[in-house]
Amino acid sequence: MAGLGPGSLANVLYQQFKRDTTDASTEDLSLRPLSDRADAPLLNPLKQGRLSSPFGWRKDPINGGDQFHHGVDLAAPEGSPVRAAMEGKVITSGFKGEYGNLVMLDHGNGLTTLYSHNEENKVKEGDWVRKGELLATVGSTGRSTGPHLHFEVKREGAHQDPLVFLKQFTGEQTALSRPSLKLDGEKE
């Protein structure tokens, strides 16, 4: 099957690392491979929201020019919780120009996720976070037209379409990929 080879994004996810949770007091942030586990899908970073701008070429919402959008924009009420899509280490947490307040996680094997335009970041650089842990709250900081989460996925520094990534690993049509649905699956 195409896309499932050793270097594929699917294989990278299944080879991701998991912190040893047997001793909660450990300071060792080393990660252990998941080997062939198929139960490690990328979590939707918002429980509710709607896709307001997809990955790829689009008309810029501020200046109207053609621009490549390196992530997806998920509109949600200001203050909504933003959760870690997968466990990892916080490598950036702070204000970064057009991104506004952002958090970036390193998940190992060259996989990173970015969460931006946050109202408030709840983690700091060097923190270890688990899948589903609170990272930030939805805001409209930086170059933004309203409250939303800008979510990016990178593999080896190359941007990936987060909707494909989420759908590929959850094995189902995600609410993120269908603008007419809320993330929790309820119709608007």
Image: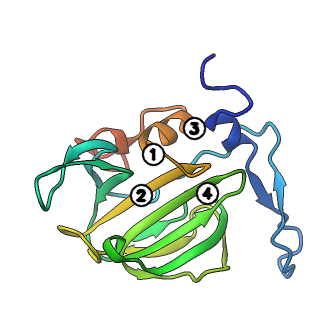
Residue holding disc 2: 151
Q: Residues within 10 Å of mark 1 (few under 14, many from 20)?
A: many
Foreground label between 1 and 4: 1
**One can see residue 39 in this view:** no
Residue at the disc numbered 1: 162
* Residue 27 locus on image (x, y percent): 84, 80
- In this figure, which colouring scheme has been used for the structure? rainbow
The kind of residue on which mark 1 rests is Pro
Left-right relation of 173 to 129: left
Identify which amino acid the numbered label 3 is placed on.
Phe
The label shown at residue 86 is: 4
State the residue at coordinates (42%, 41%): 163
Residue in the foreground of this view, choosing between 10 and 173: 10
Q: Quadrant of residue 8?
A: top right
- Circle 2 SS class: strand
The mark lying in front, picked from 4 and 2, is: 2
Q: Quadrant of the N terminus?
A: top right
Residue at the far top: name it: 1
Q: Which mark, residue 169?
A: 3
Label pair 2/3, CB-CB below 8 angstroms? no
Q: Where is residue 82 in the image (x, y as percent from the top left)?
A: 44, 68
Q: Are marks 2 and 1 in contact (CB under 8 Å)?
A: yes
